[in-house]
Amino acid sequence: MVSEQQHERFMRQALILARKGVGRTSPNPAVGCVVVRDGVVVGTGWHRKAGTPHAEVHALLEAGEQALGSDVYVTLEPCSHFGRTPPCADALVSARVGRVFVGMVDPNPQVSGSGIARLREAGIPVVSGLLEDACQEINRPFIKQVTTGLPYVTLKSAMTLDGKTATASGDSRWVTGEPARRLVHRLRAVSDAIMVGVGTAIADDPQLTSRIPGGRDPLRVVVDSRLRLPLTSRLLGLQSQAATLLATVSQDEGKIAQLRDRGAEVLVCAERAGRVDLHDLLARLGGRGIQSILLEGGAELAGAMLRQRLIDRCLFFYAPKLVGGEGFGLFCGDGVGRMADAVPLQRIGIRRIGTDILVEGEPDYSCLPD
């Protein structure tokens, strides 16, 4: 008899496997699977990339004949439809597994529950909701994109303890230490896109790449309403597997042609108050399978995203430094008039990254007026 603790232990192994695929499976979710026979793990697998076999298929292949009558632990409900790969629910039925433990139901309204129903129709018992919170945590971007059509946006910023992202002269190299900067490159590697405003792109002339061994570059998105990005920008013509996309409302065909000649994609978006409609931009990115965006600056773009309630998560790196006097802050534009109207953060986490402090949380817009 397998105890509840053992069930959780096997699902935690599946979660460890699923995390290997985080940031690499869009538009699919990251999924891990463990096959257990007589209390012994006989097969493991995780989804590596969209269009390739899913986690269950890898695990069943490894288990072979030992999959017969086994317990299967999978972090997400097995799919039941034909996409780029056959249904995983059918593969489990064909392998004649004994039981299936599912971490979370597929949030896609078009398929939710159908995989579990397929298994039960075949006489396979299914237990759902095992370590559900942890399974949802690793797939928050997938859940957001598949249920709303919008990517999951994480705001990242480095600040001094007195809230400055740069000195009055604009100098910001470097606010935080090397460990924090390495973590940011790892965050880039598991994000589908990285987004900055054109002011930051001009001032810092960044490359927005993931400079870690084996790191995957995200799509680089520059919000550039009037196409001010210089043709000499380092974001153009990069030797990278990822593209640079400029979101604009400009109709300057000459500049658009020049930017495209430099390898950029130019996306003309809907207009809002003379600027790119950020909701329209996010909907367009979500429509092409972008699940996660790392928002790195600048203050004008961050302020607009906050006011429009488009930020899902905040990562604030605080360095033990004081700039004093004038300097640049995190948000520009109109803020709230009363402290009682400030946007609270929930699910707070605090940890040390070298000498710096990382504070993370999720904005809670539910308490704000419509």
Image: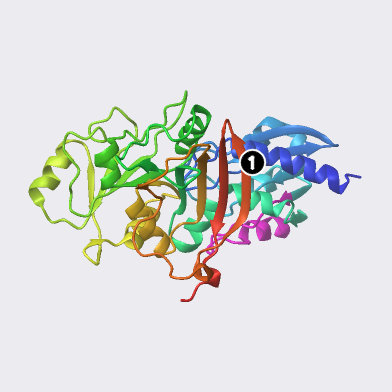
Residue 122 placement, left or right of 162: right
- The relative height of residue 144 versus residue 221 in the rendered view (above or below) is below
* Residue 109 included in the magenta stretch of the image: yes
Query: Between residues 102 and 181, which one lies in front from this camera angle?
Result: 181
Determine which residue is flagged by label 1: 32
**Residue located farthest toward the right when viewing the structure as drawn:** 1
Where does the magenta region start and end?
A: 101-122
**Residue located farthest toward the front when viewing the structure as drawn:** 325
**Amino acid at circle 1:** Gly
Query: Which residue is pictured at 48% across the width and 70% down the height?
Result: 338
- The relative height of residue 195 versus residue 272 in the rendered view (above or below) is above
Figure label count? 1
Query: Which residue is pictured at 18% across the width and 49% down the height?
Result: 227
Expressed as whole percent of the image width and height from the top left, the position of residue 215 reads 45, 29
Residue 38 placement, left or right of 117: right
Query: Between residues 267 and 212, which one lies in front from this camera angle?
Result: 212
In the rendered view of the protein, which quadrant contains the N terminus?
top right
Which quadrant would residue 209 be assigned to in this image? top left
How many neighbours does mark 1 have within 10 angstroms: few (below 14), some (14-19), or many (20 or more)?
Answer: many
Q: Regarding mark 1 in the picture, which secondary structure is present there? A: strand
Expressed as whole percent of the image width and height from the top left, the position of residue 292 reads 46, 48
Query: Does residue 108 appear in the picture of this structure?
Result: yes
Query: Does residue 57 appear in the picture of this structure?
Result: no
**Residue located farthest toward the top when viewing the structure as drawn:** 213
